[in-house]
Image: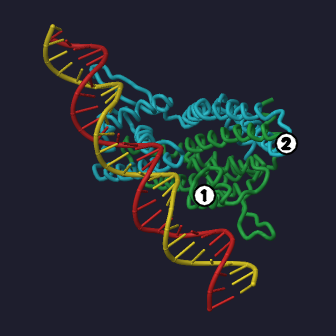
Chain colours: A cyan, B green, C yellow, D red
DNA sequence: ATCTACTTTCAGTATTTACTGAAAGTTTGT
DNA sequence: ACAAACTTTCAGTAAATACTGAAAGTAGAT
């Protein structure tokens, strides 16, 4: 049994490390992605100290990233009776995870981008020269596309897992 | 007319800058995103020197990022007769842009991630203790979800623009 | 009111990532 | 063969980002 636990910890370490690399490629900081990976695959909620120890990071770092993950809705704080400290547990349902990430990215990144596009479109609406026409057309097409995609993601994100799967099956079938 | 060109350049500068910020949030380097924004909204293909001048960046930087964008399939090199140097022009069709970004991200990031998940799932397949069971279950669900999403994106990405719109309309309607 | 067990903040530092500019390489024309 | 016009590479440097650790803040228990 001890042998098996060691083996598990090796695999898990690999997973946590790789999830960190992937997070970095997607504009999420590595530590945050690693903490997420760790909690996602943990059988029990973990304390700040346990996270610090596992990843060999400082208290400040652990704290900041844990709180950021809470801000993304990917983990939540729980308290245990008799214990004063906070424990953290991850949302484990992958569909729910996906919805939360999508919702936050929309709010933080897509909506502001749309706002920029809208402003640029407006500002060039009535310009008559060729450069302006080209610019305006491209911006308009971008805005339409992004806004369309954004609506789609709202729609899909508000589906129940089951419905989404059905829809997807139709697509794949 | 000169007044209007100045006004356009202001708007465009704003757009290029914002696109850069957004790129950074999505794990793309800022300069690369800015060059992309610039070429996307340019009426004519631009040379390395023109890009350097517009963004006030070095030759090395311009060169590297232009070539990376070519690698992503988001811009292409064109040559003009009588001119020795290379010019760059962006893919302007937003649907095609989307497909290329999706395809590359899949190849570069999703596929390797899937490989990691598969390894982790395999390695813990027959472990019997609780921690390993929890780990294995979570990894399996992640793998299924990501692999599913990956297949979906292949499917959508291989549609013609028109078909995709129709499908989307059904979703939104 | 004080102590203890925590959480939070942040100035300073380390690490990573991006950029510069100049030298080396390549291609085309004479 | 040489020169001119361009592209590519890369060692060194700058800038951005992430992290540490210690000090300050907070809240429950006595």
Q: Is residue B126 visible?
A: no
- Mark 1 and mark 2: Cα distance apart in space: 28 Å
Q: Secondary structure at mark 2?
A: loop
In the depicted view, which residue is nearer to us: A156 or A162? A156
Nearer to us of marks 1 and 2 is 2
Any mark on residue A153, and which? none
In the depicted view, which residue is nearer to us: B8 or B30? B8
Chain letter of the residue beneath label 2 in the structure image? A
Residue A19 position (above or below residue D29): below
Whether callout 1 and callout 2 share a subunit is answered no
Residue tagged 1: B62
Residue tagged 2: A129
In the image, what residue occupies the spot 29% across and 53% down?
Answer: A3
How far across and how far down the image is residue B143, in percent? Answer: 55, 47
Horizontal placement of A145 versus C5: left or right?
right
Horizontal placement of C7 versus D30: left or right?
right
Q: Secondary structure at mark 1?
A: helix
Q: Is residue B119 visible?
A: yes
Question: Mark 2 and mark 1 in contact (Cβ < 8 Å)?
Answer: no
Horizontal placement of A165 versus A87: left or right?
right
Residue C2 position (above or below residue A105): above
How far across and how far down the image is residue A173, in percent? Answer: 75, 47
Few, some or many C-alpha atoms within 10 Å of disc 1 (few <14, some 14-19, many ≥20)? many
In the depicted view, which residue is nearer to us: B19 or A108? B19
Chain letter of the residue beneath label 1 in the structure image? B
In the image, what residue occupies the spot 76% across and 51% down?
Answer: B96
In the image, what residue occupies the spot 58% across and 50% down?
Answer: B31
How far across and how far down the image is residue A109, in percent? Answer: 60, 34
Q: How many marks?
A: 2
How far across and how far down the image is residue B115, in percent? Answer: 53, 56
Asked where in the image residue B2 lies, by quadrant, the reply is top right
In the depicted view, which residue is nearer to us: A41 or B41? B41
């Amino acid at each position: 049994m001890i042998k098996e636990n060691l083996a598990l910890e090796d695999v898990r370490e690999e997973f946590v490390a790789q999830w960190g690399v992937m997070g970095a490629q997607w504009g999420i900081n590595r530590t945050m992605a690693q903490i997420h990976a760790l909690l996602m695959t943990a059988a029990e909620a973990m304390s700040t100290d346990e996270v610090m120890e596992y990843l060999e990071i400082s208290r400040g770092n652990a704290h900041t990233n844990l709180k950021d993950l809470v801000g993304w809705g990917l983990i939540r704080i729980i308290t245990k009776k008799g214990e004063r400290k906070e424990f953290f547990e991850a949302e484990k349902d992958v569909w729910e995870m996906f919805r939360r990430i999508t919702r936050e990215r929309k709010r933080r990144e897509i909506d502001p981008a749309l706002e920029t596009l809208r402003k640029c479109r407006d500002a060039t609406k009535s310009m008559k020269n060729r450069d302006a026409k080209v610019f305006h057309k491209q911006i308009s097409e971008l805005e339409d596309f992004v806004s369309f995609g954004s609506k789609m993601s709202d729609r899909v994100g508000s589906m129940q897992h089951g419905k989404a799967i059905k829809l997807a099956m139709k697509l794949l079938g």
